[in-house]
Amino acid sequence: MTLAWLTDIHLNFLRPDERAHFISELATADFDHLVITGDIGEAPTVATYLEQIYYSIRRPLSFVLGNHDYYLASVDETRTDIKALTDRSLPITYLGEGSVVSLSSTCALVGHDGWADGRFGDYVASPILLSDYLLIEDFQPSSRDGSRLSDAAKQERHRIMTDLANDCATALEVSLAEAAVDYQTIVVATHVPPFEEACWYKGKTPHPLMLPHLGCGATGDVIRAAALGHPNRRFIVLCGHTHWAGTVEIEPNLTVITGGARYRHPALQESLELD
């Protein structure tokens, strides 16, 4: 079977005609299943874009959400809107709901959003203020004018980041364990790279002041544990977020592929041929 992969397509940056052209082009590609690893649009539009993609390709679609997909709303509100879409009996699956999607008799797809949790690099010293902290409602109380870079604001943001990342990791751990029972190859879709080595930036690991905002150590821990606990299983992680492409082998049976992306130029990353 052929699994096509999109990441960081940011369809909200396109004009309506550009967006329609890109979505119609997807329908001409040769694949059996499409997976999207986040940053599809923003909270008010992401469900609409997913529906438009499905009705164009008319093939099963699975996805996780990226940080931009929560912009202009809260995490809970966004996921409620997504659940309304996935409850409509269409072959559209939000992997963050704990689904194990069977791609073939030997291959399954699982995943979750992941969330940058500040575990890589030097979060305390980092002066970076992401738009996440201003545009996602869960972070806004810690980012009011006058206190955005204070120690207290940074500590509160770090608590929220950690809680979100841990929630994703806990759910993913369950899906990985379920998939490993019956499938030889397990594809893991996540938005945020789960290992420092996979946080590609200009072909290398980024500066320690950038790293805290680019990787999810919590999901990395559970993915590595699953791979070490099932050495006869093959794990392939697909992620995005950094907009720079690279591949790294974390364990002999664990490969992480980070997708590249350019704003206003969405494109298929690749098509994976799976048994």
Image (tube, rainbow, N blue to C red):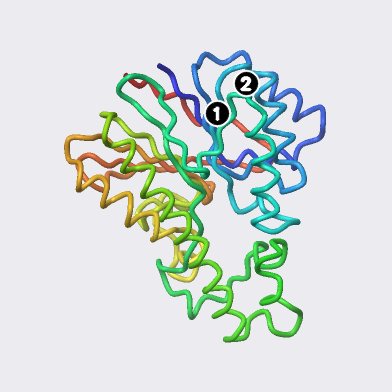
Left or right of 170? Residue 242 is: right
Q: Which residue is painted at 69% across and 61% down in the image?
A: 136
- 245 and 156: which one is in front? 156
- 107 and 242: which one is in front? 107
Q: Which residue is mark 2?
A: 26
User: Could you tell me the amino acid type at mark 1?
Assistant: Leu
* Mark 2 burial class by Cα count in 10 Å: few <14, some 14-19, many 20+: some
Total marks drawn? 2
Q: Which residue is painted at 49% across and 80% down in the image?
A: 125
Location of the N terminus by quadrant is top left
Left or right of 36? Residue 256 is: left
Residue 181 pos. (x, y %): 26, 35
Where is 94 relative to 24, above or below? below
Q: Which residue is painted at 50% across and 22% down in the image?
A: 33
> Is mark 1 in CB contact (under 8 Å) with mark 2?
yes
User: Which disc, if any, is residue 206?
Assistant: none
Residue 229 pos. (x, y %): 20, 47
User: Could you tell me the amino acid type at mark 2?
Assistant: Leu
Q: CA distance from mark 1 to mark 2?
A: 8 Å
Left or right of 249? Residue 138 is: right
Residue 175 pos. (x, y %): 39, 42
Where is 253 relative to 130, above or below? above
- 161 and 170: which one is in front? 170
Q: Which residue is mark 1?
A: 268
Element marked by disc 1: loop
Where is 157 relative to 80, above or below? below
| Quarter location, residue 195 | bottom left
Mark 1 / mark 2, whichever is N-terminal: 2
| Quarter location, residue 82 | top right
